[in-house]
Amino acid sequence: MDVIEEQQWEPKILAFCCNWCAYSGADLAGLNRMKYPENIRILRVPCSARVNPQFILRAFQKGADGVLVAGCHPGDCHYATGNYYTRRRFQVMKRLLEYSGIDPRRFQAKWVSGAEADKFRATVTKLCEDVKAIGPSRKLGGSK
Amino acid sequence: MSDTTVKMRDIAKDLLDKGTVHYIIGWEKGRFSNQSPPAFITSAAHADRLIWDEYCLASTAKYLLDDKFPAGKIGIFARGCDARAINRLIQDGQINRENIYIVGICCSGMKDPATGNTADKCQHCTHPNPIVYDILIGDPVPETDKPERFKAIEELEKLSPDEKHAYWSKQFEKCIRCYACRNVCPACNCRECFVDQYRVGWQGKQNNLAENQLFGLTRAYHIADRCIECGECARACPMDLPLMELNRKLIKDINQLFGPYEASLDTETTPPLAKYHLKDLEEFM
């Protein structure tokens, strides 16, 4: 039974995409019929700074195998400065996650502009490959 | 009776007699010889209850939150850690400096009541002398930066993800979610803490590893750039979770990423996570 489950295992990846850049980038990737892994679940947020670090913990707790936070390039934020805060916040958060035993490859943050459909595809593909290589997440506090 | 005790009592009597303060927060002798819990002295006649010995471990500053709109000034005895805690509360907009009268005490460290050795929180103390006060008792004791306080964190960082996970699981399994760490923390001064927001559903109330870990990590992150390293959380924890290992990890990273910063040395400097710099390190390109 376990063997079958393992063969069928596909990672669940949650992506927080900012409405103005990353989400448009994902949209453009779709319009261009780009192929990227269907493991990704996109959650649209008004700004990458809307992503409370607690969301990441909650996602891992609820069983996400990988989490992506994507926003506008520095300087391009729709709200002028949001992503500068994101940058500080998640550089610290990333290290805390690693410190608490979550494989650093499971969490990524990336700047993806509305025109960078290919970067979105590449980021998602890479994250998915990385997570597949590490295997299912133990979840937060889970035994496996 | 120590010199400091005598001075404390004299000052308290004087302040209460003159009506400068309408009560003063200090320490008194507890039921046991190795405990000196906080005391609230409301009249000069009771000033002799005050004491200063090696077991005055509890921080006095957090009590200021219980009386945010005092009828008169509140007197408070403050060591280095308490003084930084007071700054923390002022900077977070919780109390007014005008409402408090600070009697600073230069502190040379307390003892752990269980072992009789120097308490953990005092071992790693970088600011034993109060940084804000109205009058000062005693002579300033030498201060050092104590970079060795990050040693335990560096050791933990070397472990593999699996080992780290095992270590923190073992720790958080012990947590009974009494929230003593939050209650005692001067940086945890939100009017409503995220763990008390039952309708938002931020966090489950169950006591299990997953929820405990979410609580512990979130709390550490909430105070990341505002932690004053008083070590009260770890001291108050009845299950002996090494909470300072989380706080110091964040402090260490923030210092490395955004430049050296010590929280609450003044009330003006914005904490690092509440500001940004265009030239910040870029890892997400």
Image (tube, coloured by chain):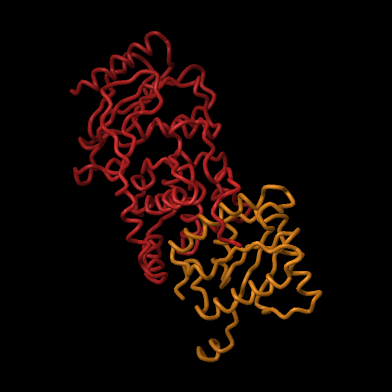
Chain colours: A orange, B red
Pick whichever, A104 or A59, lies toward us. Answer: A104
Quarter holding the N terminus of chain B?
top left
For residue A98, above or below residue A133: above
Residue B230: where, in percent of width, then height? 37, 40
Residue found farthest to the right: A31
Residue found farthest to the front: B279
Pick whichever, B179 or A113, lies toward us. Answer: A113
Residue found farthest to the top: B18
Residue A144: where, in percent of width, then height? 46, 76
Residue B63: where, in percent of width, then height? 44, 32
Q: Quadrant of residue A37?
A: bottom right
For residue A10, above or below residue B184: below
Identify the residue at horizontal 44%, vertical 51% (top origin): B256
Identify the residue at horizontal 29%, vertical 27% (top origin): B106
For residue A12, above or below residue A50: below
Pick whichever, B58 or B109, lies toward us. Answer: B109
For residue A38, above or below residue B19: below
Query: In this image, A70 relative to B155: left or right?
Result: right
Residue B83: where, in percent of width, then height? 40, 30
Quarter holding the C terminus of chain B?
bottom right
Query: In this image, B164 relative to A42: left or right?
Result: left
